[in-house]
Amino acid sequence: MTVSSGEPNPDMPAGPLPPDAALPPEAALPGAGVPDAFGRLWTPHRLAYIQGAGKPTGPGAHEGCPFCVAPTLTDEEALIVARGELVYAILNLYPYNSGHVLICPYRHLADYTELSGAEAAEFGDFTMRAIRALRDASGPHGFNIGMNLGTVAGAGIAAHLHQHVVPRWGGDTNFMPVVGRTRVLPQLLVDTRKVLADAWPAV
Ligand SMILES: [Zn+2]
C-alpha cells in the first residue's frame, strides 16, 4: 500500500543483475537493469491531473464540474468518503497530505454565502466529522481547514464551493514540496477512502 521508496521488490533480485548472455557487452546500456540508489514515487493520480482529467470546461454545473459529477458515481469510483443529505465528503484527487478531504454541497454554487441555513449546518457538521474520522484513523497532530473563494484566492474548481480539511503531522513538510514541487504521499487514495469511510462517525 505504501508508495514510498526503498522497499524491496520481490520480483527483482536485491543485487545487480547478471550480465545478459544473449547480448554482447557493448550492446547493453551502462547500468541498464541494475537497481540504482534512487527510490521511486508512484503517483498515478498526478498523471491524470497533468493530462487534464476532471477539469471543467466552463463554470456551469453541466460543463464537467467534478463536484457535480462525483455524486453520480459510486463511492469507490468517485473516492467519496461519506454522503449526507445536502453535502458530501470526498478525497481531494491532488492531496497536500494523505487524508486531504473536501466537503462539498451537492448544489453547484460558488460562494459560501449562497449556502442555505440547512446546507451551512451540514457543511459544518461534515467538517467536524471529517476531523473526527481523520483523528480516529491516522492521529494527525493538527489540521488546516478552509475555503478558497475565487480563482484568485487559489480555488482550483472555483465554481463549486468546497472546504478543505487537511491533516497535518509534525515534520510533514520537507524539502520535497519546496525543492521538487512533489509531495510524498505514503498511502494510495483508494486505501485512504476505505479507511476514512470506515472511521466516519455516524453522529
Ligand atoms: Zn458543480
Image (cartoon, grey):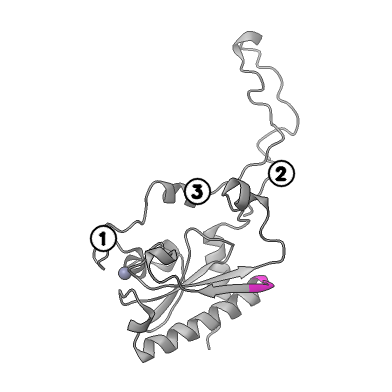
On the question of residue 132 being in view, the answer is: yes
Residue sitting nearer the eye, 78 or 45: 45
Kindly state the secondary structure of the residue where label 1 is placed: loop
The residue that appears at 57% across and 49% down in the rendered structure is 181
Residue 117 placed where, x, y %?
Answer: 37, 91
Q: Residue under circle 1?
A: 58
Kindly state the secondary structure of the residue where label 3 is placed: helix
140 is within the stretch colored magenta: yes
Question: Which quadrant, please, contains the N terminus?
Answer: bottom right
Q: Amino acid at mark 3?
A: Pro
Crowding at mark 1 (Cα within 10 Å: few <14, some 14-19, many 20+)? few
Residue 116 placed where, x, y %?
Answer: 34, 88
Ranked by sequence position, the earlier of labels 1 and 3 is 3
How much space separates mark 2 and mark 3, taking CA atoms? 18 Å
How much space separates mark 2 and mark 1, taking CA atoms? 42 Å
What residue span does the magenta drawing correspond to?
138-142
Crowding at mark 3 (Cα within 10 Å: few <14, some 14-19, many 20+)? few
The residue that appears at 58% across and 69% down in the rendered structure is 195
On the question of residue 3 being in view, the answer is: no
Q: Residue under circle 3?
A: 44
Q: Amino acid at mark 2?
A: Gly
Label disc, if present, on residue 6 of the rendered structure: 2
The residue that appears at 52% across and 66% down in the rendered structure is 193
Res 66 quadrant in image: bottom left
Q: Nearer the viewer, mark 2 or mark 1?
A: 1
